[in-house]
Image: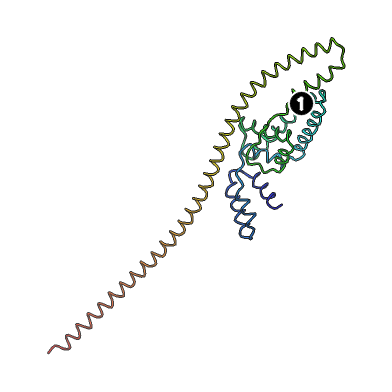
Amino acid sequence: MEFEQVARELCTADPAGFIPARDREAAAAKERGDEELAAALKKLRKPTAAAWAVNLLAVREPDALSVLLELGERLRSAQRELRGDDIRGLAGERARVLRELTDLAAALATEGGHPLTEPTRQQVEQTLTAALSDPVAGREVQAGTLSKPLEYSGFGLDELAVAAMRRNAKAEPAEKARAGKARVAELREELRRSEAQLGEAADALETAERAEREAEERCEELRDEIEELREQLAQRRDALERAEGEQRELRRGAKAARQRRERAQRERDAVAERLRSAEAP
């Protein structure tokens, strides 16, 4: 429970301070003797801008997010039962809710000092769509600890709507049935062309997103390395200052010793001179 709470606080705070804040929490856990918590916290990765905005939405507007997840359950129920009318109605509601929640997440990010770019807004909507379509993704989003956006594989609403219309068409008169079949055929052809275009676009998007994720992960690793090197540099600077202080003390000690030796030498020479004078005939 403590990990979830700390992780949620870290993943919704200003992302600019994520790494030092994470390291402080991990160090504090280690000092308390909780090695497991310290190790888990150290593995946390800085959220991307899109993931951070979704985390803000999950933590600050849980009721709004619950509306989205409840809509996902209703959509899955309509799909399983092939209720064409319900699917078409819910599809419109789905678009509206996704748009509203994306706008809300963007507003929260702006309030937090990090306005979202258009590509990042698209990643936010993609993550919310994944939460709506998949209960597992929904729970991940609700946790408020995402480090990167989630991917969306699709509901396939057009396919289900066509299947539902085909089932309902069997009960209609023959003329309407023939018209319906012709329309379904047209829709299938349009769907086939759209799916081909979508497939090409999805492949290109997947390649681009994979490259983006790899770059972000590499940047995060380099940021961690830089923070560690900065800590090491600070430690070495402290050690250098201490060594220089010790060197100054030793120099002062050596100078004082040389002065004492010179005084002793002069005194010795004076005594020797008086001795020679005393011994002279």
Return the residue found at the far left: 281
Q: Which quadrant, please, contains the C terminus?
A: bottom left
Please identify the quarter of the rendering in which residue 88 is found.
top right
Q: Secondary structure at mark 1?
A: helix
Return the residue found at the far bottom: 281
Mark 1 closeness class: few <14, some 14–19, many ≥20 residues within 10 Å: some
Judge from the rendering whether residue 93 lies leftward or rightward of residue 111; answer left or right.
right
Q: Position of residue 149 (x, y in %)?
A: 64, 36
Residue in the foreground of this view, choosing between 143 and 109: 143
Q: Position of residue 229 (x, y in %)?
A: 49, 50
Residue in the foreground of this view, choosing between 239 and 127: 127
- Residue beneath the point at 14% across and 88% down: 280
Q: Position of residue 28 (x, y in %)?
A: 62, 57
Q: Position of residue 207 (x, y in %)?
A: 58, 30
Please identify the quarter of the rendering in which residue 36 is found.
bottom right
Judge from the rendering whether residue 66 lies leftward or rightward of residue 147; answer left or right.
right
- Residue beneath the point at 45% across and 59% down: 239
Residue 225 position (above or below residue 32): above
- Residue beneath the point at 67% across and 20% down: 194
Return the residue found at the far top: 175
Which residue carries the number 1 mark? 91
Residue 128 position (above or below residue 175): below
Residue in the foreground of this view, choosing between 35 and 237: 35
Residue in the foreground of this view, choosing between 274 and 32: 32
Amino acid tagged 1: Ala
Please identify the quarter of the rendering in which residue 221 is found.
top right
